[in-house]
């Protein structure tokens, strides 16, 4: 029997082949390969989609974070508060600016940063907080925005997993100073290569970000900042413009799968994802918890179900951060336990209901 894949990105191309091929063809014929109208059109469409005034297309999600930090002058000697459990890019962006990532443990239910622990992590060197909307579940932003106001800190949301999600009815996109995005192919809005963006409502930050991604320049050979070369590719922008029109439809399909899982697995001893009342998640991942995760994963593998672990080793436990005593986590911390228990089930716009039913059946058999 065919395996149930974790995520089938090729099926996304197959569904939109004619539109995507036409968009790529248009760019190739245009002769405009760097910035220009394709990138500008996508930036406008994406900003509007996110309920934000401005979007700046950049090379990838990591660069989006780095450029956002640099736009508010974060550098050596500064500290930035990050979640303990996130993809390592959130931390690397801080380190690459010369600043120190200061981890705050997760909320047990949502696995997002525990806003009640943020205050205790603030020092005189703290400049910013990066809440991550992990797994496509928006963080409870209001308390974080409140703390940031009191302490005059910037907020940069890492929304690499949350395209289309809503907090208090409004899309993620400009609730705080800046929001960073990744268009890595496996994300909810994925390119066919690398890509990223920053959205904001702040005109000054928008103008600065446009320069920072392009050698610190807006007028050829005049350089205001020591900028990078990190521009959203015109071919990727054209592809993203096609896929943006499908994002809500594709997120609805994810939601359908998620509600099938939530309904069917409710009576098991698994811990299921928790959705806050003030949020509309977009189910980038569907993460369940079980104390014997490895055994469960093996049984599912034997019955043809692909699963993944997000994330087996949090950034603070990685070799990359071994020398930084700031970041050491002990095994009793909530995020270390989640790393041992989390298991991500197949979910995506091209997983059909019969595949989802096979996943459910296999889990019930494995737990029996
Ligand atoms: C994917 C991801 C990134 C990085 O995006 P890239 O485009 O791969 O650089 C950053 N943060 C989170 C939470 C992510 O999931």
Image (cartoon, rainbow, N blue to C red):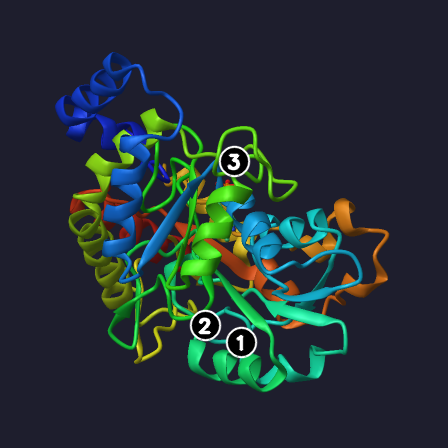
Q: Which comes before the other along the chain, label 2 or label 3? A: 2
For the residues labelled 2 and 3, the Cα–Cα distance comes to: 37 Å
The residue drawn where x is 44% and y is 32% is 194
Q: Which comes before the other along the chain, label 3 or label 1? A: 1
Q: Residues within 10 Å of mark 1 (few under 14, many from 20)?
A: some
Quarter-of-image position of residue 256: bottom left
For the residues labelled 3 and 1, the Cα–Cα distance comes to: 38 Å
Disc 1 marks which residue?
107
Q: Secondary structure at mark 1?
A: loop
Q: Which mark is residue 359?
A: none
The residue drawn where x is 74% and y is 57% is 99
For the residues labelled 1 and 2, the Cα–Cα distance comes to: 6 Å
Q: Secondary structure at mark 2?
A: loop
Q: Is residue 117 left or right of residue 193?
A: right
**Position of the C terminus by quadrant:** bottom left
Q: Residues within 10 Å of mark 2 (few under 14, many from 20)?
A: many
Q: Is residue 49 visible?
A: yes
**Count of numbered circles in the view:** 3
The residue drawn where x is 24% and y is 52% is 254
Marks 1,2: beta carbons within 8 A = yes
Disc 2 marks which residue?
110
The percent coordinates of residue 186 (x first, y second) are 38, 39
Q: In the image, which is nearer the foreground, mark 3 or mark 1?
A: 3
């Amino acid at each position: 029997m065919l395996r149930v894949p974790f995520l089938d990105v090729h099926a996304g191309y197959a569904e939109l082949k004619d539109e995507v091929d036409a968009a790529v063809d248009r760019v190739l014929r245009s002769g405009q390969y760097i910035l220009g109208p394709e990138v500008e059109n996508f930036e406008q469409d994406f900003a509007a989609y996110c309920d934000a005034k401005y979007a700046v297309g950049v090379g990838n999600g990591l660069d989006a974070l780095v450029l956002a930090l640099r736009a508010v002058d974060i550098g050596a000697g500064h500290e930035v508060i990050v979640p303990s459990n996130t993809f390592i890019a959130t931390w690397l962006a801080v380190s690459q600016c010369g600043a120190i990532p200061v981890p705050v443990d997760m909320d047990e239910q949502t696995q997002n940063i525990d806003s009640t622990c943020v205050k205790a992590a603030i020092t005189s060197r703290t400049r910013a907080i990066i809440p991550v909307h992990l797994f496509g579940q928006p963080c409870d932003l209001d308390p974080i925005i409140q703390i940031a106001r009191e302490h005059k800190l910037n907020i940069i949301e890492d929304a690499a997993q949350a395209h289309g999600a809503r907090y208090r009815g409004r899309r993620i996109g400009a609730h705080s100073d800046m929001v960073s995005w990744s268009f890595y192919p496996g994300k909810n809005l994925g390119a066919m290569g690398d890509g990223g963006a920053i959205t904001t409502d702040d005109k000054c930050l928008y103008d600065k970000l446009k320069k920072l991604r392009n050698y610190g320049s807006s007028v050829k050979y005049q350089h205001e900042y020591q900028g990078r070369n990190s521009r959203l590719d015109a071919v990727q922008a054209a592809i993203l413009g096609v896929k943006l029109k499908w994002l809500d439809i594709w997120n609805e399909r994810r939601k359908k799968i998620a509600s099938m899982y939530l309904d069917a697995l409710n009576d098991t001893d698994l811990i299921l994802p928790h959705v806050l009342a003030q949020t509309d998640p977009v189910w980038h991942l569907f993460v369940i918890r079980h104390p014997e995760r490895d055994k469960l994963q093996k049984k599912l593998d034997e019955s043809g179900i692909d699963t993944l672990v997000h994330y087996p080793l949090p950034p603070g436990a990685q070799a990359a951060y071994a020398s930084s005593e700031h970041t050491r986590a002990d095994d009793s911390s909530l995020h270390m336990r989640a790393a041992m228990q989390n298991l991500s089930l197949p979910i995506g716009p091209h997983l059909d209901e019969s595949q989802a039913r096979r996943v459910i059946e296999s889990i019930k058999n494995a737990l029996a």
